[in-house]
Each structure stands twice: as structure tokens, then as C-alpha cells.
Image: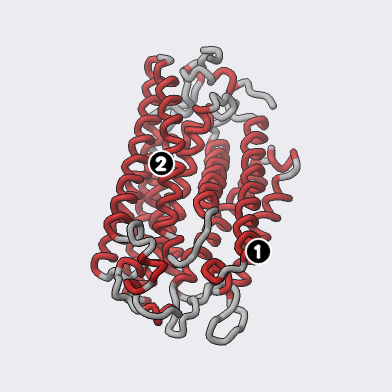
């Protein structure tokens, strides 16, 4: 066990409740209302796809924070101790994300084929370029034990309940330790991390398969859960960097955060940039090399229009993801000076967040077909509802973070690693 040196509570800046939580809530509610209004402009199905995009994006960010908390505890890390508290505030959003997912379930009860076609076994696959009905599809019948409404709802509910429980354990342990400094809270967090990491890995993979991959349930990919894991952690690291910039600008982290902390989170962001590239390339290469129709069609519809053979907008979105998701952050984070510059790190974090959103749009929206069986274009009015949904759900998540922010010290002042974290060097 590390040294039990603790920070001097009187030297830790007090947090303030007047931190813009009300504005975040107003923005969130406004975004949600605008998204609802989109039903009357573009129809419920397109708004459902927009809402699913926002939920997949922001749930991923919260999952990334939860994973980083558990990774911190399981490895008994020291440098991340002063940053961990912000992730503990961030995971308070899980309860609201669970509530915000309910409209998708209700929409699927009203219209079973609004998103996930396999909910309706009578759905005519001819409308999406197939033949027969879902119930007559051999690829559905072989997967029907998993691809059904009851399994979907049960798996989603269990996943959210588990994530909320884990988040509550880590928040309780960390906040209580501020009060009494008891080492038992650190040990408890380590135990729950050992339990929570495999649970989160399995449920994370399960929900992204059910929510996103199964939109085209014919498709096969063994890399999909790992792809989403990479997105979650990269996004959470980017949010962590943005929070660090915000707290540095406010003065809260004055004398607490050093260039060594910036360098370490920059290195981790760089590492997951390479990891994402490895996973994404491996998925594409394996599918391209095998050249099996049940796998290649997923990429084909994201490159050419089946009805005309012409290149569609999604091909250029894919090229943007290739260069924007890997090459830009790879070269943008490779240098030492880049990692220790808060302004530059803020730029890179914002870029990564934007590209992750585009990547999730790329994975979800082409499943929505027009009357010819071609994916809807990337640049169209329906993406306006994606933007409003992302702002709406994001506003609620930011509100949850800011609402939790004044309930605890800025940093975990009695964590056994806090002394090492405050004096951390590379």
C-alpha cells in the first residue's frame, strides 16, 4: 500500500455551487424539446435514430469515465488521483441516461420496426433491400434467442442498473474517505473494480451489439464491443482534459495540476488513439480479406448506392473518420510539448469528441434506408435532430456533473495516493 500522506484540507480550494448547472439543465431541456419538435418535421423514425445516436454517444462517455475509475483503482495508480474525482462526478449521469433511454423503448412498443427491425417478425425486408419477412429470415431465426424485445429490454435494464450501482459504490467510497480517511474505502473500491471491470466489459459489448450493431442484424463482427470500448475511453479522456482546462481556467487547480499530469493523460489519449486504429483497421481488414457477403455489405452501403452504383456521402464520412480519428490526434499528440500545453490539449480533446460523434453517426444512420433501399444521406435535415438530441442529452449529463460537483472536495484529500499524486513526476 502506498504512503498514507494526505493533503491539507485547508489548502484545498472550496468548490462552489454556482457553477452553471442551471444553464446546463436549461440547454438540455431545450435540446430535448427541439428534438421532440423534429417528430412533426421529419417523422418519428428519423428522430428515433437521432435519439439513439445521442444515447449511444453519451452513455459511452459515462462508461468511459466508469472504466477509468476502475482502471485507476485496480492498478493502484497515483498520478490520476487528483483527476479521478471529476470522473466520479461524471458517472452520476447514469441514472438520467437510463431515464432518457426509456423513450426508445416506448417508441418500439408503439412501432416495433421504428429502429430495430427484428422486433417485428412481420416486417417486410424488401423495404431495406432484402426479401421475405424477418420471421422467415434464417439469419434472424438463428439469433432470435438474443434478438427479441424482451432480451433487449432485460439486458439494457440490467446493464444500466449495474453501472449505476458501481458508480454509487465508487462515489460513496471516495466521498466518505474525505470525511474519515479510512483505508477500508480504498480497499472496497479495489474489490468493486475487480468485479466491475469484467461486468462492464461484457455489458458494454452487449448493449452496443443490441443498440447499434443489430440495426443491421445480418452483419457479423467480432471486434464491435472492443471498438465501442475504445470510443468510450477516448471520449472520457477527452472530457477529462476539457474539465481540467475548465478547472485550470477557473483557478481551482492552481498549484494542484502540473505539466506531469497533463503529460500522463496526453500519453494515455495517444495510446488509445493507436488502440482505436488497431481495432478499426483489424475489423475492416478481416472483413475485406474474408470477402463474405454477410459482412462486406455493411461497408458497401457506406460507400456506394445499391440502386445506382454511385459513390454516396458516407464514403467521404468514412475517409474523414480514417484521417480525423487517427492521423490528426496521432500527430497532434505525439510530441511532448503538445501534451503539456493546456490550450492545445483542449483543441485536441474537442476534435476527438467531435470525431467520435461522427463515427457513431456513421455506425447508426446508414441503417435507415430510403424507398430504394439506399442509406439516407449524411448531410440532410435529419442530422439537425441528431445535433439537438446530442445537445439535449449532453446538457442533462453536464447538469448531473455540475450538480454533483459541489457535494465533495475538489480532490480526494485523504486518499492514500494523494500525496504521490500532488508531487507526481514522470
- Is 61 left, or right, of 151 in this rendering? right
* Residue at mark 2: 401
Identify the residue at horizontal 33%, vertical 57% (top origin): 145
Report helix, strand or loop for mark 2.
Answer: helix
> Looking at the image, which residue sits at the far top?
4
Residue at mark 2 to residue at mark 1: CA–CA distance: 45 Å
Q: Is residue 374 above or below residue 169?
A: below
Q: Which mark is residue 289?
A: 1
Image location (x, y in percent) of residue 79: 59, 27
Q: Quadrant of residue 339?
A: top right
> Looking at the image, which residue sits at the far left?
110
Image location (x, y in percent) of residue 226: 53, 49
Can residue 178 be seen from the camera position used here?
A: no
> In front here: 309 or 327?
309
> In front here: 140 or 230?
140
Q: Residues within 10 Å of mark 2 (few under 14, many from 20)?
A: many
> In front here: 204 or 126?
126
Q: Is residue 313 above or below residue 231?
A: below
- Is 376 left, or right, of 45 in this rendering? right
> Looking at the image, which residue sits at the far bottom?
308
Q: Is residue 66 above or below residue 390?
A: above
Q: Is residue 69 above or below residue 326?
A: above
Q: Residues within 10 Å of mark 1 (few under 14, many from 20)?
A: few
Report helix, strand or loop for mark 1.
Answer: helix
Image location (x, y in percent) of residue 39: 33, 72
Between disc 2 and disc 1, whose residue precedes?
A: 1
Identify the residue at horizontal 56%, vertical 72% (top origin): 302
Image location (x, y in percent) of residue 213: 46, 61
CB within 8 Å, label 2 to label 1: no
Q: Which mark is residue 326?
A: none
Of the residues tagged 2 and 1, which is closer to the observer?
1
Identify the residue at horizontal 46%, vertical 36% (top origin): 197
Amino acid at each position: 500500500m502506498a504512503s498514507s500522506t494526505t493533503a491539507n484540507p485547508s489548502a484545498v480550494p472550496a468548490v462552489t455551487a454556482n457553477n452553471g448547472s442551471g444553464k446546463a439543465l436549461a440547454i438540455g431541456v431545450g435540446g430535448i424539446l427541439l428534438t421532440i419538435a423534429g417528430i412533426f418535421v421529419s417523422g418519428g423514425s428519423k428522430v428515433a435514430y437521432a435519439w439513439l445516436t445521442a444515447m449511444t454517444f453519451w452513455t459511452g462517455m459515462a462508461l468511459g469515465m466508469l472504466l477509468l475509475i476502475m482502471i485507476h483503482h485496480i492498478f493502484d495508480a497515483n498520478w490520476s488521483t487528483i483527476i479521478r474525482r471529476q470522473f466520479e462526478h461524471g458517472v452520476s449521469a447514469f441514472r438520467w441516461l437510463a431515464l432518457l433511454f426509456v423513450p426508445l423503448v416506448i417508441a418500439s412498443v408503439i412501432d416495433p420496426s421504428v429502429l430495430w427491425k427484428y422486433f417485428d417478425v412481420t416486417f417486410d425486408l424488401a423495404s431495406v433491400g432484402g426479401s421475405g419477412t424477418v420471421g422467415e429470415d434464417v439469419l434472424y431465426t438463428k439469433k432470435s434467442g438474443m434478438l427479441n424485445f424482451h432480451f433487449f429490454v432485460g439486458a439494457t435494464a440490467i446493464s444500466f442498473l449495474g453501472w449505476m450501482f458501481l458508480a454509487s459504490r465508487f462515489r460513496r467510497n471516495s466521498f466518505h474517505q474525505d470525511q474519515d480517511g479510512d483505508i477500508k474505502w480504498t480497499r472496497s473500491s479495489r474489490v468493486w473494480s475487480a468485479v466491475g471491470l469484467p461486468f462492464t466489459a461484457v455489458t458494454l459489448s452487449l448493449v452496443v451489439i443490441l443498440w447499434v450493431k443489430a440495426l443491421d442484424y445480418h452483419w457479423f463482427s467480432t471486434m464491435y464491443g472492443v471498438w465501442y470500448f475504445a470510443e468510450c475511453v477516448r471520449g472520457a479522456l477527452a472530457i477529462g482534459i476539457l474539465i481540467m482546462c475548465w478547472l485550470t481556467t477557473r483557478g481551482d487547480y492552481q498549484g494542484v495540476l502540473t505539466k506531469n499530469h497533463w503529460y500522463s493523460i496526453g500519453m494515455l489519449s495517444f495510446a488509445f488513439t493507436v488502440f482505436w486504429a488497431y481495432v478499426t483497421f483489424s475489423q475492416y481488414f478481416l472483413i475485406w480479406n474474408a470477402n463474405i457477403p454477410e459482412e462486406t455489405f455493411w461497408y458497401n452501403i457506406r460507400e456506394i448506392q445499391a440502386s445506382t452504383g454511385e459513390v454516396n456521402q458516407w464514403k467521404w464520412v468514412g475517409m474523414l473518420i480514417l484521417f480525423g480519428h487517427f492521423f490528426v490526434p496521432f500527430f497532434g499528440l505525439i510530441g511532448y510539448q503538445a501534451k503539456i500545453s493546456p490550450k492545445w490539449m483542449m483543441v485536441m480533446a474537442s476534435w476527438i469528441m467531435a470525431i467520435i460523434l461522427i463515427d457513431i453517426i456513421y455506425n447508426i444512420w446508414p441503417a435507415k434506408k430510403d424507398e430504394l433501399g439506399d442509406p439516407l444521406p449524411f448531410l440532410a435535415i435529419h442530422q439537425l435532430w441528431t445535433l439537438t438530441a446530442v445537445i439535449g442529452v449532453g446538457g442533462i449529463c453536464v447538469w448531473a456533473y455540475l450538480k454533483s460537483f459541489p457535494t465533495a472536495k475538489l480532490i480526494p484529500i485523504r486518499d492514500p495516493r494523494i500525496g504521490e499524486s500532488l508531487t507526481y513526476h514522470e
